[in-house]
Amino acid sequence: LTPRQAIRAVLSGMNAALRRHPDLEAGLIIISMRQHGPHIAKIIARQALAEAQHLHERSGVVGFDLAGAERGNPPRLFRDAYDIARRGGLGLTVHAGEDEGPERVWEAIDTLGADRIGHGCSAAADRVLLRRLARDRILVECCLTSNYQTGTVRRGAAHPLFTFLEHGVPVAVCTDNTTVSGTDQTRENRLLLERL
C-alpha cells in the first residue's frame, strides 16, 4: 500500500466503528519512522494532512509523530516534516528520551514544537525540563511494560511516570506496541494500580 492507502484503510475501519458506536470519539496519529529518513517523513506528513480530521466530516488524522531509533537520528533532522504538520494544524508528538538523554526531549520541544512526548523517561532526571513539561502542559506517554522490557527503566526501579506526576507533568498510560510487548491497555492500567 502507498502511505495514503494505508492511512485511508485505517480511517475506513475507524469510521465504520464510529458509525456503529456513535458515542465513541477517535482520531489517528500518523507515525513516521526515523530510520526512513527526513525526506520520507515529509512525504508522510503531507499524506497525513490530506486526511486531517479538521478538513473532513468524519474521523481523521489528528496528529503526527516520530518514532524509531533515537541514536543517530536527532529530532532536528525532521524539522521540515514537523513544519508541514504544524502548518496543517496537526498535534505534534515525538518519541524522545527513551534511548537518549533529556537533551533529545528538549530538542523535540524547542526545535520541533512537540506538545506530546513518547516515553520521555530521561526527562525525569532534569528538574528544569520537568518544570517546562508541567508549565507548558506537554503530555508524556508512559509505557510501563515496554520501558521495563527494553531496559529503559531498570526492573524493580520506580517508573519515571511517578516523577512526572509528582511534578505536575500530564501523563497518559499507553501500551507502546501491544504485539511486541504482549500487553494491552487493561494490563497497563492494572500494572500502574499495583505500583501506586
Image (spheres, rainbow, N blue to C red):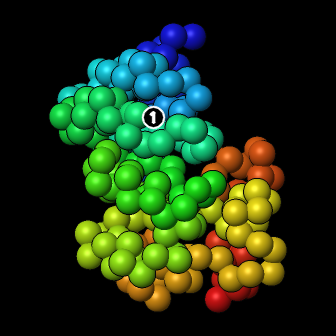
Query: Residue 28 in the image: x percent, y percent?
Result: 43, 39
Q: Is residue 59 visible?
A: no
Residue at the spot x=32%, y=35% of the render?
A: 79
| Location of mark 1 (residue) | 30
The reply, left or right, for residue 76 in relation to residue 178 is left
Q: Amino acid at mark 1?
A: Ile
Q: Residue furthest top?
A: 2
**Residue 38 at what x, y percent from top left?**
43, 25
Residue at the image position 36 percent from the left and 78 percent from the top: 128
Residue 80 in view (yes/no): yes
- Residue 105 vs residue 180, the one in the foreground: 105
Question: Up-down: is 193 above or below 90?
Answer: below
User: Residue visible at 48% across and 64% down?
Assistant: 102
> How many marks can you see?
1
In the figure, is residue 187 to the left or right of 86? right
Query: Which percent across, then down, holds residue 11?
Result: 45, 29
**Residue 60: image location, x then y, percent:** 35, 33
Quadrant in which the C terminus appears: bottom right
Vertical side of 196 occupied by 190: above or below: above
